[in-house]
């Protein structure tokens, strides 16, 4: 376990414990461990039990893994064995292509225009619920806001976050899946371990939520013209003469929900936190929205005239990519630019470390939205900035996510200003029980309604 994997090019090997390898580092101190690997070289390696892992931290090599050699990798057996395996998030290559084709039409421009109206409407409704001077816990507010938006866009549902059942089910699913990923050894599938029991129970709770939501769909009502994902998918199947199973079709929408649930609220949370830490940037955002909107609710057409808001959101995604790690498993032996990757090896690509390469982003820990002016963004190497992944498995809803974040920043910044409560402790990342960059504590803020705004 102490020898480095044999390659044509030298790979820096980071030692771990006998037998267990780097399990404790990866589970309990993941970000620092990823940074150690990144500092060791463009390609570094470690072991987890009997499995060999490589971290690829160079843009051109990342592109080769995700694009040129995409058919040589899948998401890995541990993800396939989790309850997330039925979705586009973790499906195998051929099934993945079929599912993407089915969902891609849902992101056509004519639909995105409707989704933008939904986003702005929910943003306005939420800010009206907050009272001036009220103290709120920002993360659950962003979770429920984006969950309600997703519920409407995907299923035409209203306020699906209200009773907390769905959020608890999704949280349980993710936490149980994360626990399964970062263990040195996986018991035989026939063993019903406590971890697998929690995963099964979370899946059952989620399935019940699916049944509750889809039970409200009336497929026989021709007057029920809708624009949500579920309706459009069912309509497309009906037009092709296919049999309709509402619950089965709904499951095709859930991967989009999972992706949105795990990324959008965190991206917004960190954007507000960074703005509160940088009042001069916050002021510039509000000056832009005041100048462009003049007090009215923003529309999709307004976004082109709100470039600084988008720069803030993109810089937030650079510093705090909601999914800090991409995982692939080699299906066979292959050579990637001189690096010999054995079959079964796990390749990790970390947007978190890639976005902190000082040769691409000088002073990488400094929050600077000017990095993403159109001129400077064009100069970035391909795959140096990849908050939504890349290649055939790039996040299908990436344009929706950018639109949603851009629009919600503008909507809320126009109406109010968030302030951290007095003596608020510094907030860090908690990755021990999550795949996403969640805060390690509550972010409590005071809502300050802006003068002259509703």
Image: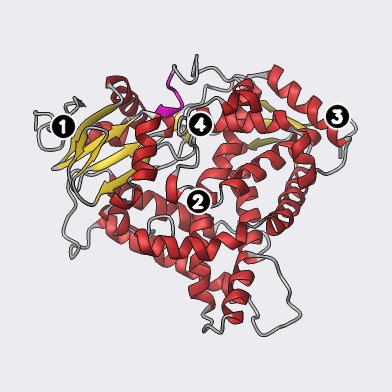
In this view, the mark in front (1 or 2): 1
Mark linked to residue 291: 3
**Which residue is under mark 1?**
7
- Sequence-wise, which precedes: disc 3 or disc 2? 2
Tell me the CA gap for discs 1 and 2: 35 Å
Q: Which residue is mark 2?
A: 259
Give the image quarter of residue 198: bottom left
- CA neighbours of label 2 inside 10 A, class few (<14), some (14 to 19), many (20+): many
3 vs 4, front mark = 3
**Disc number at residue 320?**
4
Looking at the rendered image, the quarter that the N terminus falls into is top left
- Relative to 326, does residue 83 appear above or below in the rendering? below
- Residue 165: in sight, yes or no? yes
* Viewer-nearest residue: 376 or 29: 376
Q: Residues within 10 Å of mark 4 (few under 14, many from 20)?
A: many
Q: Are marks 1 and 4 in contact (CB under 8 Å)?
A: no
Q: Is residue 203 magenta?
A: no
């Amino acid at each position: 376990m102490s020898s480095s994997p044999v390659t044509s090019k030298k790979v820096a090997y980071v030692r771990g414990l006998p037998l267990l390898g780097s399990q404790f580092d990866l589970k309990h101190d993941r970000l620092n461990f990823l940074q150690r690997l990144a500092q060791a070289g463009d390609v570094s390696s470690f072991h987890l039990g009997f499995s060999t892992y490589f971290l690829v931290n160079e843009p051109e090599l990342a592109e080769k893994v995700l694009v040129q050699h995409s058919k040589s990798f899948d998401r890995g057996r541990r993800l396939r064995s989790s309850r997330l395996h039925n979705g586009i998030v973790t499906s195998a290559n051929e099934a993945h292509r079929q599912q993407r084709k089915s969902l891609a039409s849902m992101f056509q421009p004519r639909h995105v225009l409707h989704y933008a109206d939904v986003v702005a409407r929910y943003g306005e409704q939420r800010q009206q619920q907050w009272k001036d001077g009220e103290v709120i816990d920002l993360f659950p507010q962003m979770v429920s806001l984006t969950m309600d938006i997703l519920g409407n866009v995907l299923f035409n549902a209203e306020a699906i976050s209200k009773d907390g059942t769905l959020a608890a089910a999704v949280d349980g699913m993710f936490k149980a899946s994360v626990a399964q990923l970062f263990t040195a050894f996986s018991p035989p599938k026939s063993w019903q371990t406590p971890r697998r029991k929690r995963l099964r129970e979370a899946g059952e709770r989620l399935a019940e939520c699916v049944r509750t939501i889809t039970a409200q769909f009336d497929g026989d009502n021709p007057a029920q013209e809708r624009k949500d994902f579920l309706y459009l998918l069912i309509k497309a199947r009906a037009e092709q003469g296919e049999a309709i199973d509402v619950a089965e079709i709904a499951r095709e929408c859930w991967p989009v929900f999972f992706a949105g649930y795990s990324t959008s609220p965190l991206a917004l949370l960190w954007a507000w936190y960074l703005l509160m830490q940088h009042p001069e940037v916050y002021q510039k955002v509000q000056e832009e929205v005041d100048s462009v909107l003049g007090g009215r609710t923003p529309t999709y057409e307004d976004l082109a005239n709100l470039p600084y808001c988008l720069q803030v959101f993109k810089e937030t995604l650079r510093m705090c990519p909601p999914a800090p790690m991409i995982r692939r498993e080699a299906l066979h032996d292959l050579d990637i630019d001189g690096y010999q990757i054995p079959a079964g090896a796990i390749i990790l690509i970390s947007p978190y470390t890639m976005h902190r390469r000082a040769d691409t982003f000088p002073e990488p820990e400094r929050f600077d939205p000017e990095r993403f002016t159109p001129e400077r963004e064009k100069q970035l190497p391909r795959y140096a900035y990849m908050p939504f992944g890349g290649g055939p498995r790039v996040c299908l809803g990436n344009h929706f996510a950018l639109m949603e974040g851009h629009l919600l920043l503008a909507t809320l910044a126009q109406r109010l200003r968030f302030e951290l409560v007095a003596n608020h402790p510094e907030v860090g990342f908690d990755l021990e029980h999550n795949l996403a960059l969640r805060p390690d504590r509550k972010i409590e803020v005071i809502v300050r309604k802006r003068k002259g705004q509703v």
